[in-house]
Image: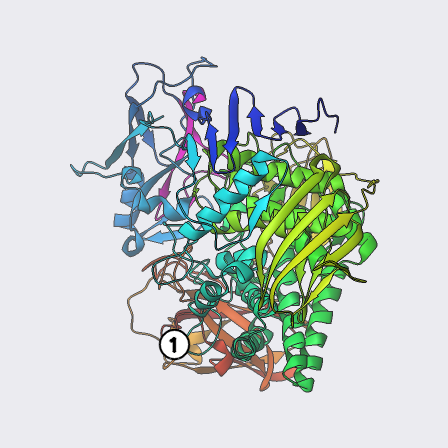
Amino acid sequence: MAQKNTNVLWQTKEYTLYADSVVQNKYKAKAISANEITSNYQSPLNEYQSTKIEFKFSINGKDNELKFAINHNFNVLKGVTETPIIKFGEQLKDNTGETNTFMEPNTKLTIRLDMNSVLKDLNTQGYYTTLNGDKIFKEDFKGLYLAGGAAPMMWDFDNLHNKPELTLKDDDGDGIYETTITLNPLKKEKETASQWLMSKDISAFPQYKSPHAIADAIYNMSIEEMIKAVEPDSTFRTGKEWAGVWTRDISYSIILSMAYLQPEVAKKSLLRKVNKKKRIIQDTGTGGAYPCSTDRMIWATAAWEIYKATGDKDWLQQAYEIIKNSVDDDMSNAYDASTGLVRGESSFLDWREQTYPKWMQPADIFESENLGTNAVHYQANIVLAEIGKILNKQSDVLKYKANAAKIKTGINKYLWLKDKGYYAQYLYGRNNKIVSPRSEALGEALCVLFGIADEPTQKRIIESTPVTDYGIPCIYPQIPGIAAYHNNAVWPFVQSYWGLASAKVGNETSVMESIAAIYRPAALFVTNKENFVADNGDFAGTVINSSNMLWSLSGNISLIHKIIFGIEFQADKLVFHPFVPKALEGKRSLNNFKYQNAVLDISMEGHGNKIRSFIVDGKKMAVAQISSMLKGKHIVKIMLTDNAITDNKINKVANYTTLATPIVNVQNDTMQWQSIHRAKKYLIFKNGSPLELTRETKFIITETCAEYQVLAIDALNRASFASEPFILKDCANIGEYDIAMYAIPSTLNYKGATGKGFVEISKTVNKVINIPVAIAEDGEYAINFRYANGNGPVNTDNKCAIRTLELDKKFVGTVVFPQRGNEEWSNWGYSNSVKVKMKKGKHTITLAFRSANGNMNGDVNQAMIDHMQLVKLN
């Protein structure tokens, strides 16, 4: 980057980082001293709120009124106070013709909806059929909600019920539902502070001084916010007052810097995320949490980091049992023998449509095999092997090393995108998985840091992964029609991991941009926010945000300790590999750095990533490391070589959004889909492989017993997500087995079963169900189950039902029955599919509750089963 003067540390067209300040257009944050930052930043959101709004209605918190990406359009011009009466399922279009107008603050709008046609169906036939063919039974009609893109509306369908103003009501019983919302609410106060002024004593923690006032002040602010992030019971508060403390949040924070800065708080916080069976807790989430989500295993890496920082053998022994129990459960429930990968939702990107196509149900998300989550599982197995060495458990060392090797091989075989130079986001689909070629920033960084990629590949990942104007986005490119949160957003903690990975491969440009991308929002917002919008760098506009965010501040601190000073904790020593970009050269110090029984006062001079001399207490050392046996206070002096770092490419790109996902309808032997805006062509997949490229919006199916999908491609040759997979219902290879024929039918009054009834499964009822089948010919078959689980909503709670599938008394896989809606027991869908090879003849398929099938709730592990579907794949 060209630099205008010596005071400029980093400069782009969007903002400039100076030695004492950050400037972004008319906004400026300045470090008055190491203990004070002032900022005049205000979110421009109020100034540019368009009068044109988009919204749609939702029954039971689902996107079930209009087709995906088709919304109601209305122009809230001055003087307009209500919409026309809108009919459910019929799009309202804006016919005003007026453009480029901005909304008055505190604009009140009454939105009115005619639900009479829906109510008629519910009352006459007992159910309403949505556009995609789903039936909503009268007994399951729980509420009517408003979703949209202009606050207080939101596109997070799962959480609409949490905002009373988004609930529509029919108080007079005429079938016209309505609600009144306040658009563009005028903020009485700034949404971010104008000043940070030190108020806590931070002297117990490492003290940093450098030639750059902005870095010193942001570091001190982060240390102070770290102190504020500790609850009275000496556990961490993540900053998410709305959500509680998540396993992944505290774990990623501990790995970054909390393991050594606050080890006792870190230990206690991790132990709070362990259940009574000594398993790591997968927090409440998609479809009832585990095993739809499995990234709780990052706990293992956090626990290992605490040991490396403290040398506490008692902690190591305690952690080992917990990690081992959890990995062993995953080996039964989530490991995919066919790919070597581990199933489960994207690590930390745990908000379904924020990173997955909307058609994917929780069972589909369970079946996905994600980059970041697999990196987490790889490292958990490596940690177990490393601890096994210390605890002399040699058989375990071999077992978990073998697990890690399989996962590593799977990542490099199935997720590496040679043409792009980085890993794919995940494998997804049903009977045949395909690759989602989006980048996934955290997963890319972890593959570098954990050594999943070899050294040349690590370098290429940092050079090739897309980076946008305000930092590296969680995913790239973005998903259309989805509000900013994980989609279209930069998270500072992810940026920190990206910075650490960039330092590891020696990419100075990437390191410096990472530092600037973290300092810019910290200074302007005068706090460590959780996230911000990738498009404009603003904290406002994301669905949810928090200040004083634990993993953001932990990452900020790690910039100094783990990048600038290059401090790396190993099992028996502290190793230094500093990385000081040329722009940050000069003298700096880090005093009162505690390492086990030693306290280090560290000074460092120069720039580069090579050490000229490493001196401890006046003695020049042959290697830049400190033994874990060292005790007391010591003076460390580091001189860098001032080496020039070359070959510093990064892939700086404009933010970009892909096309909408096609929605395919099938009539007889013809599949059709709506024309996608900006699409130039469509790619049809058959059984997970490309079949045909076409400009048409229909395709004649010649092989009925195959699985088909369609994706849209734009002028830049970038693809949408693939459509929902389907096999024609009249395929001769599909067999349905009414479960009520093999177990006692339930007497519960739930609607929508297809056969003679349905069967309840729980920890005490129908723990084992045997289904005899007669196979006409050898081949590979897919087995799944039509089920209902109304024990909780799609997005929270922990009551996913889990069962083992056996063929002729041998384990063949795990079947999950995730939650589908709170008390929605007539809401039916399909479990994941388990693929098995079967020979011609008679077999017994068993659905059983086994010891490995415990979920996160522990008590409720229940679903209703309608039928089993058996599909011959080949």
Q: Is residue 623 visible?
A: yes
Q: Residue at x 51, y 39 (%)?
A: 482
Residue 568 lies, with reference to residue 163, above or below; the image says below
- Specify the amino acid type for callout 1: Ser
Residue 288 in the image: state x and y as whole percent.
43, 63
Q: Which quadrant of the structure image shows residue 583? A: top right
The residue most toward the left is 172
Residue 63 in the image: state x and y as whole percent.
43, 44
Residue 193 in the image: state x and y as whole percent.
40, 33
Quadrant occupied by the N terminus: top right
Q: Is residue 72 magenta?
A: yes
Q: Is residue 687 visible?
A: no
In-front residue for pair 798/526: 526
Q: Which residue has dot 1 on it? A: 762
Q: Residue at x 70, y 32 (%)?
A: 680
In-front residue for pair 7/152: 7
Q: Which quadrant of the structure image shows residue 779? A: bottom right
Q: Residues within 10 Å of mark 1 (few under 14, many from 20)?
A: some
Residue 180 lies, with reference to residue 546, above or below; the image says above
- State left or right for residue 658 relative to residue 124: right
Residue 115 in the image: state x and y as whole percent.
29, 38
In-front residue for pair 566/184: 566
Q: Which residues are magenta?
A: 48-74
Q: Is residue 694 magenta?
A: no
Label 1: element kind? loop
